[in-house]
Amino acid sequence: MGTEWMADGLCREYSPETFFPRDGMGVIVAQRICAVCPVAGKCLVYALDNHIDHGVWGGKSERERRRLLRERRRLRLIYRDAV
């Protein structure tokens, strides 16, 4: 996946610190912005595919993305074993 979608991200209208918060309230603020962003889905896939560890991407916190990656790996293993 390329990065041309980034030009349409609402995050461009905010300081980078907004999406790299130091506390839970900061995460909530970033997630509210992402919730109405037209490219949030592409942003999340980009972060997952590139194993981005820090910040809020696609409306998901670092912890939420780790969970999604674990689930993605689990599903790949299930599919691989089924074939």
Image (spheres, grey):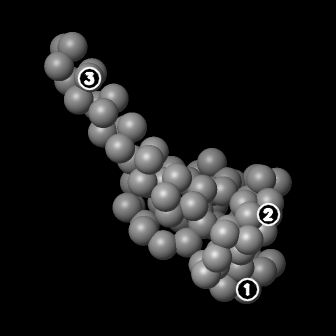
Camera-side residue of 22 and 82: 22
* Distance from Cα at disc 1 to Cα at disc 2: 12 Å
Identify residue for label 3. 78
- Residue at the image position 60 percent from the left and 56 percent from the top: 60
Q: Position of residue 39 (x, y in %)?
A: 69, 54
Q: Earlier in the sequence, mark 1 or mark 2?
A: 1
One can see residue 57 in this view: yes
Mark 2: which secondary structure?
Answer: helix
Mark 1: which secondary structure?
Answer: loop
Mark 3: which secondary structure?
Answer: helix
How crowded pointer 3 is (Cα within 10 Å; few <14, some 14-19, many 20+) is rated as few
Q: Earlier in the sequence, mark 3 or mark 1?
A: 1
Camera-side residue of 64 and 77: 64
Q: Residue furthest front?
A: 24
From the viewer's perspective, is 57 left or right of 48?
right
Image vertical order of residue 26 relative to residue 41, above or below? below
Identify residue for label 2. 33
